[in-house]
Amino acid sequence: MNFSNYIVYVDESGDHSLTSINKDFPIFVLAFCIFEKEKYSQSAVLKLKDFKFKHFGHDMVVLHENEIRRDKGWFKILNSKEKKESFLDELTQIIYEEDFTIIATVIQKDKLFSHTNSPYDIALKYCMERTYRFLESKNEHTKMTHIIVEQRGKNEDEELELEFRRVCDGHNFKNVRFPFEIILANKMSNSAGLQLADLVARPIGLSVLKPEQTNRAFDVLKDKFHKSDSGRVEGVGLKVYP
């Protein structure tokens, strides 16, 4: 099998329901983080392991943005402002230093009217199409690329896989077959890529929802979005819909 030199890790923020919309977070974010495999294994994986050894004494901790923000589980140790700021500063620096590309879609659910597709399906199709374009730019688009997605539940996973296969089979902007393979990973999978994707999804959503609000996490992500040849991010590396 001819595998590409890239691997994609996916995470989301918010829920994709249109029947119950959270007025405080009326959006759904899907983030694709694209890593060159060699750089990923030799840098990101090692840095996160060292980070965990330093702060927890072992590397079994799974970094979840929600738990870090709320000081839950392993992150109860962040029980002072100084500890938490130091922890976040160090984690933010790792993300800043890592070389990866972001392709994300933000669905504004409160503005999505009379749409038959779910926000997840809309976001998934867009991100897959732009990932294909990214791989084209690297001359890697004819090789097998694995896309790693966190499991959500039996029904949700089956629906996701069905839509994923549909897009791959030619229901896309180019009407061509995408050589992508989906891997559904357990939520507690200690994957550096999935953890980094988890850490970027919410800040991207907040940058759209509250653009005037200070967003230190998003500031370090700005230069990681996929860009057009002219340097444009909107509609290329970041799609806000509608």
Image: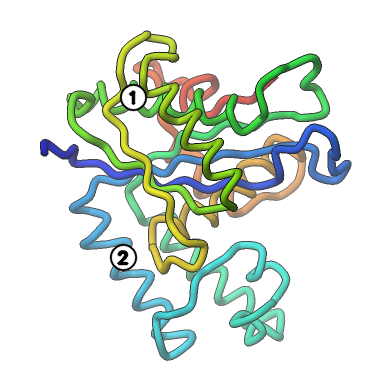
Furthest residue in direction bottom, as rendered: 57
Is the residue 14 above or below the residue 173 in the image?
below
* Residue nearer the viewer, 172 or 68: 172
Residue 46 circle label: none
Seen at 34% across and 21% down, the residue is 133
Asked whether the viewer can see residue 211, the reply is no
User: Which of the two labelled residues, at mark 2 and mark 1, occupies the earlier sequence position?
Assistant: 2
Q: How crowded is mark 1: few (under 14 residues within 10 Å), some or many (20 or more)?
A: some
Q: Quadrant of residue 230?
A: top left
Q: Residues within 10 Å of mark 2 (few under 14, many from 20)?
A: some
- Residue 90 percent location from the top left of the image: 48, 70
Q: Quadrant of residue 50?
A: bottom left
Looking at the rendered image, the quarter that the N terminus falls into is: top left
**SS label for mark 1:** helix
Seen at 31% across and 23% down, the residue is 178
Seen at 70% across and 38% down, the residue is 16
* Residue nearer the viewer, 198 or 91: 198
Give the residue number, with chain letter if any, for mark 2: 45
Give the residue number, with chain letter if any, for mark 1: 132
Amino acid beneath label 2? Val
Is the residue 197 above or below the residue 80 in the image?
above
Seen at 64% across and 80% down, the residue is 73
Furthest residue in direction left, as rendered: 1
* Residue nearer the viewer, 8 or 120: 120
Q: In the visual, does 112 lie left or right of 48? A: right
Amino acid beneath label 1? Tyr
Asked whether the viewer can see residue 70, the reply is yes
- Residue 136 percent location from the top left of the image: 25, 21
Q: In the visual, does 235 lie left or right of 117? A: left
